[in-house]
Amino acid sequence: MMLFSKSVDGLFCLYSCVDIKKPIIVINPDTWYKKLPFARIQQKHFLDNNKVESRLGFVKDKVTGTYKLVWLRTKTKKKIKEETSWTCEVFDFGAKNWRRVIPPPPNHGIKHEHAPTFANGWLYWLSQEKTNLVAFDLHMEMFQIVPNPVVERHMEMVCNMFGRSLTTTQEGHYR
C-alpha cells in the first residue's frame, strides 16, 4: 500500500508502509520529483520476508530550516512473532543522506495506522499504551515518552492545530 506524507511547503513524500523494496519519492506537484537513496534498513533487509510497519514524518526543522524525513519502523520476525525490533532513520535534505537515530526509540508500540503529527519542533506518534505518546525532538533527534494529554478508551488520533499537538477522540472530544 502506497501512502502520502503530510505536505510541507507544498512538498510531500510517496512511500510504502509495508514494502521496503519500494523507493521513497519526494514530490513537488508543480515541477519535479526525486527518488531518495535507500535507507539502511532497506539495504539490509531488501531480500527478507519479515513484516515491516512504518509511518514517515516529513517535516521542516525550524531551527536550521532543513527538511527532514523521519522513518520510524517496527520489524517483526515471522518465525518469532514476539521478537520486534525498533529502528529510526532520518533523511536530512541538507546533508542528502540517511543517519540512524541513536539511542533507538523506546520500546512502546506505535499505532502505525495513524501518521505522526508535528507540533512545536516535535513529531508525535500514538502509543499502543493510550496513556503515552512517543515524541521525537526533530532538531536534537532524540526520543522521549510523554504523557498523553487525553486518556480515553476511544482515542483516535493526534493532530496539529495552530502549531500545537491536539489529541482527538472518537466522540470528538479534545484537549
Image: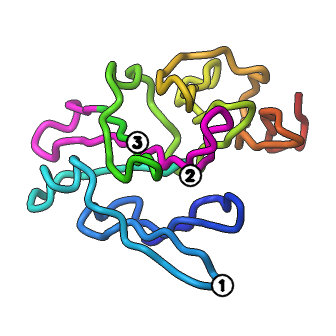
Q: Which mark is residue 111?
A: none
Q: Could you tell me if residue 55 is visible in this image?
A: no
Mark nearest the camera among 1 and 2 is 1
| Dot 3 amino acid type | Val
Q: Nearer the viewer, residue 119 or 53?
A: 119
User: Mark 3 = which residue?
Assistant: 90
Q: SS of the residue at dot 2?
A: strand
SS label for mark 3: strand
Going by the numbered disc 2, the residue's amino acid type is: Phe
Q: Which residues are magenta?
A: 58-85
Mark 2 is surrounded, within 10 Å at the Cα level, by few (under 14), some (14 to 19) or many (20 or more) other residues, namely many
Q: Quarter of the image for the N terminus: give it.
A: bottom left
Location of the C terminus by quadrant is top right
Q: Earlier in the sequence, mark 2 or mark 3?
A: 2
Residue 21 in the image: state x and y as whole percent: 23, 67
Q: Which mark is residue 58?
A: 2
* Residue 70 forms part of the magenta stretch: yes
Residue drawn at (37%, 53%) of the image: 96
Residue at coordinates 60% horizontally, 43% vertically from top-left? 116
Q: Which mark is residue 30?
A: 1
Nearer-N-terminus badge (1/3): 1
Q: Percent position (x, y) of residue 10? A: 70, 68
Marks 2/3 in contact by CB < 8 Å: the verdict is: no
Question: What's the residue type where badge 1 is placed?
Answer: Asp
